Amino acid sequence: MIKDVNLTKALKQYFGFDHFKGDQETIIRNLLAGNDTFVLMPTGGGKSLCYQLPSLLMEGTAIVISPLIALMKNQVDVMNGMSEDGCVAHYLNSSLNKAAILQVMEDVRSGKTKLLYVAPESLNKEENVEFLRTIKISFYAVDEAHCISEWGHDFRPEYRNIRPTILKIGNAPVIALTATATDKVRCDIKKNLGINDAREFKSSFNRPNLYYEVRPKTAEVDRNIIMFIRQHAGKSGIIYCLSRKKVEELAAILQANDIKAAPYHAGLDSATRSQTQDDFLMERIDVIVATIAFGMGIDKPDVRFVIHYDIPKSLEGYYQETGRAGRDGGEGLCVTFYSNKDLQKLEKFMEGKPIAEQDIGRQLLLETAAYAESSVCRRKMLLHYFGEEYTEENCHNCDNCLHPKTKREAQNALLITLKAVLAVKENFRTDYVINFIKGRPTDELVSHKHNELEEFGLGEDEDDKLWTPVIHQALIAGYLKKDVENYGLLKVTPAGRRFIKSPQSFMIVEDKEFDNGFDDESRDSSSSTLDPELYAMLKQLRKDVADKHHVPPYVIFQDPSLEQMAVMFPVNLEELQNIPGVGIGKAKRYGEPFCQLIKKHCEDNHIERPEELRVRTVAKKSMNKVKIIQSIDRQIPLDDIAGTENLDFNELLDEIEAIVYSGTKLNIDYFLEEVMDEDHIDDIYEYFRTSDTDNLRVAAQQLGSEYPEEEIRLVRIKFLSEMAN
Ligand code: ADP
Ligand code: MG
Ligand code: ZN
């Protein structure tokens, strides 16, 4: 009976749509026929309808398991808006009081309710199980099904109990839906829900209108973002940051620069949050700065850009978040700021977690890093990650395709790699295989006696940086694959085995370099607006001032600061403080002649100072800096300060460096004397006195390995504090 139903007519009748989108109709028919069903469809593809429509047509009530309360309410409102008596859909979750729950139960029992949305923790509750046992269930829909897997971007342990609970309540067909799933996650979902035979409907995950770009994250990232937003003035955008603190800071900076922006994170009260969401939807604000808490429920079709301020924790999360841009098929710019430093920070963060969790988190992070650093088409990489092959040579809509790198032959490197993977019995991951190829006898390698194999060190003559892109691109090309059960173990595919027998050309592109911002020579491209004549004059002035004070030039102002002066033309001390790396102390001590020079240069050359380029900074809300300064004055050991400020030691050093670089004097001798050898202090100090760069890597190279980086940083702080401030 159900099979013959005219679905198009029902679609029109209930939802007012004329046609099904994509596979919707076949999916619905499969479910109506009583089969388990697995739907992989990108965000905005129309997954909800795949269970909403059949629920209206089938006998009984459909149970929809969905992780977010806000999302449920929204969908329930939509469904009830379409019907007359307003109880076609209900939800059961922790937000309801006793009376409301009784009402819901009554409507369900009377058969009026066709769709019951349940949060997984509510589903698992004993009293709800008891109740659900008594009613007729048409099917179970598990929305956002990737939440089942630790390998997804949004693992929810309660999702693991869904199958056992279904068994208690009573069997019925299951439809699982998700917008992102790698092979690993897909496999986890099926296994966990016990729907191994489910028919799978997979739409393409390609979003041709989305433009993907990864930029190096330098000290200028805030300014980059402000410029970007100004270039897209009046358009809606979302900026994702990993921490609440950063969200608040960045939102404040944007506001100070007359951008209609607001922060959004789970620490804000719910009234503020829903106000912000509303303001965004109604376009009273243009930009939301958010943690990943934002966006799951939001359906704004014309978000024009999504910026990742920090590296996303997984590519699945990245895909999901960037997916919120350009849902209407129009422009959607996805820009990510990436530095190795962030990667290390995130890895450090995970150190407190259980080993298994750390391991998963680390591997997901490595996937993101590989994506960011690669010069391969971003679309190709993303789609490959989701098990889809993208065969176009050039997508014309990602940074790597718009600025392609020249390829190089890597036939021999691939051959070495494949042999290495086989030699270690296809039982190890990328980093292990690279150590093996490079001939590095790590403890782990030695414990497996792999250093005794003939293939050990086959690639030791090649550049270190070759191997990651070779392996990454061999995965994309299908010569290697990652094991799904034991995620990450490299396996050679049949194509890989054929390659070993008869090697062919294998062209690859090398990875990009992404080093930490502040030390880095490579500045971003927006410095093309830099006034070269002024820059040269500023450099000369800096040299004169440095000579006068008998210090190296960088002690006065660092290069990036000078560059910014030549872009932004600050003409008084107040404006000068808006230049990165210039604080009030430095501005007062050295600023005057610089401002005068800039002013004169502007007048002489009739330069209109680019008002819109002047980026205002805000007094950082973080009390960190003040507290750090006070604590150092009180001679509290730095490791204790790090402890009370909840920073790891390197982060504390970052903060202290920022303080010192912008011109505040700090005396950390009490700490140095306690933790460091006096000779070391002197040697490093002397090095900086005579060196013409403060670059850490150069210092580490020059000084040699007996001077740990931490020591170099500590003494550099002492030096800068004494010489510059
Ligand atoms: P998903 O859950 O896959 O992200 P939704 O179910 O929220 O997507 O649907 C996205 C949008 O597409 C909604 O606004 C929905 O009303 C619309 N939609 C779904 N199916 C159709 C259809 N057949 N025709 C027109 N619009 C549709
Ligand atoms: Mg959905
Ligand atoms: Zn591309």
Image: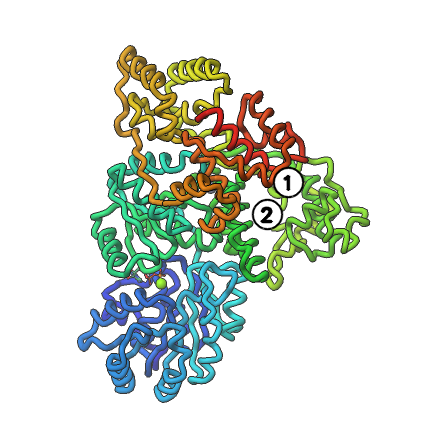
* Badge 2 element: helix
The kind of residue on which mark 1 rests is Phe
> At x 44% / y 22%, what residue is drawn?
556
Q: Is residue 200 visible?
A: yes
Q: Which residue is drawn at 27% across and 61% down?
A: 270
Percent x, y of residue 344: 54, 46
Does 115 sit left or right of 314 as displayed?
left
Residue 412 in the image: state x and y as whole percent: 70, 39
Q: Which of 622 and 502 is in front in this view?
A: 622
Q: Are marks 1 and 2 in contact (CB under 8 Å)?
A: yes
Q: Is residue 332 visible?
A: no
Disc 2 marks a residue whose amino acid type is: Ala
Real-space Cα distance between discs 1 and 2?
9 Å
Closer to the camera, 199 or 575?
575
| Figure check: 35 above or below 180 | below
Name the secondary structure under disc 1. Answer: loop
**245 and 119: which is toward the camera:** 245
Which mark is drawn over residue 506?
1
Q: Nearer the viewer, residue 596 or 216?
A: 596
Q: Quadrant of residue 713?
A: top right
Sequence-wise, the earlier of marks 1 and 2 is 2
As drawn, the label of residue 477 is 2
160 to the left or right of 95: right
Residue 427 image-quadrant placement? bottom right
Q: Where is residue 671 in the image (x, y as percent from the top left)?
A: 54, 39
